[in-house]
Image (spheres, helix red, strand yellow):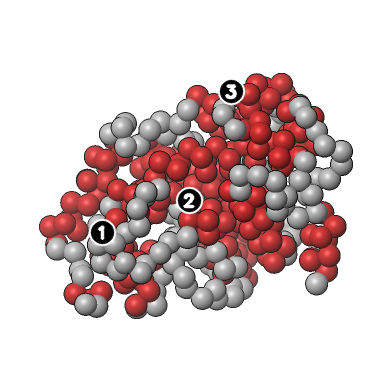
Amino acid sequence: MTVHHLHLHPVQRCVLRERVRHTIDKTTTVPAFSVVVQKLINLTTQPHVDLEEISKLARIEPGLATKFLQVANSAFYGGNPLNSVEDAILRIGTIEIRKLAMLITMMDGLSCFRRTKPITEIDPHLQIDWTIFWRHSLLTARLNEHLIAAIHPPSGREYLAGLLHDIGKLFLHRHFPSEFEIVMIRAKEDEEDYYSAENQLLDTHHAEVGAFLGNKWKLHSDIIEAIHSHHVFPPVETLNSPESPAVAALTLVVANLLAGAAGTDIHGKNPQPINPARLPGWNRLSELAGKEIQLPELNVEMKFVTDTIQFLNSQSPPPAIPSRKALAELAKG
């Protein structure tokens, strides 16, 4: 049976959005963020944070302190082995520790969206690598923050928007597996992107679902809007100032495309190189930055996020995060 015979019935297509919203409203299926995660989100957007605040949160959240120590003692940071959370935070740095804490808590807290069994209703051979999902999310977060930093100091919201931009996929995969798989198959057989297939088969899409979740969790409106529109280029005329929400939306669109082109697409598509200069609004971003925006070395970023996710997924020692020297050598190559 080909995917062309798997179009959803019109009635189903019309009511999926409401079914999604109803499921999100059920606290038993979509739990609220813990107090620790909420505080971490708030800390992420503050310019100055007391080390003691972060260490207190690390002691409260199970496993967070342990992860801090594992990362601080990895090859990436080097130095003598550390035994205290405070020393680990000092070694990693307050800015990076907040990002690391957010990544860890997101990966752990959103594990409730992962299915315990593979999808088998239509195609038993269809497998989804959620390690690649987090690799893509982390790379998007880093690239999004890099792009914004060229225009104005990052607020922290850009990083969080990058981490969460595809959260709607996790939700649909967990709670609406049949619809999710139909879209996956359509995208694969017709060699089109997942978002386009969603718009053909469903009355909603993962970006909108992600925005619904952002509202549920009371995230900042800029984060919600960026998640909702991360596949849509905003009109150039709306890019009227560096702090415009449209600018934050555009950088996430670009970061998402660049991350996909780097080979982090969970749908198995072959990565296609992207020239940012040809993207709508790119020249305007450079104008707002007052200079041509330089992208980081994507192979270096890809190496970093791959090893970081592998490290955080591992239960013990392997210090998968590369050393600074190794990253420098990779950049030269």
Q: Tell me how far mark 2 sits from mark 3, CA to CA.
A: 27 Å
State which quadrant residue 186 falls in.
bottom left
Where does residue 96 sit, x and y in percent of width and height? 71, 41
State which quadrant residue 94 falls in.
top right
Where does residue 106 sit, x and y in percent of width and height? 52, 41
Where does residue 117 sit, x and y in percent of width and height? 35, 53
- Specify the amino acid type for callout 2: His
In the rendered image, the vertical position of residue 272 relative to residue 283, given as above or below: below
In the rendered image, the vertical position of residue 250 relative to residue 30, given as above or below: below
Dot placed on the residue nearer the N-terminal end, 2 or 3 = 3
- Specify the amino acid type for callout 3: Ile
Q: Which of 197 and 266 is in front in this view?
A: 266
Residue of label 1: 178
Q: Tell me how far mark 3 sits from mark 1, CA to CA.
A: 38 Å
* Left or right: 165 as drawn, with respect to 53: left
Secondary structure beneath dot 2 equals: loop
Dot placed on the residue nearer the N-terminal end, 1 or 2 = 2
Label 3 crowd (10 A; few <14 / some 14-19 / many >=20): few
Where does residue 229 sit, x and y in percent of width and height? 43, 54
Q: Answer yes or no: do the residues labelled 1 and 2 have beta carbons within 8 Å?
A: no
Q: Tell me how far mark 1 sits from mark 2, CA to CA.
A: 22 Å
Residue of label 2: 165
Furthest residue in direction front, as rendered:
316
Quadrant where the N terminus sits is bottom left
Secondary structure beneath dot 1 equals: helix
At 35% from the left and 57% from the top, the residue drawn is 118
Residue of label 3: 60
Residue 144 in view of the camera: no
Quadrant where the C terminus sits is bottom right
- Specify the amino acid type for callout 1: Ser
Label 1 crowd (10 A; few <14 / some 14-19 / many >=20): some
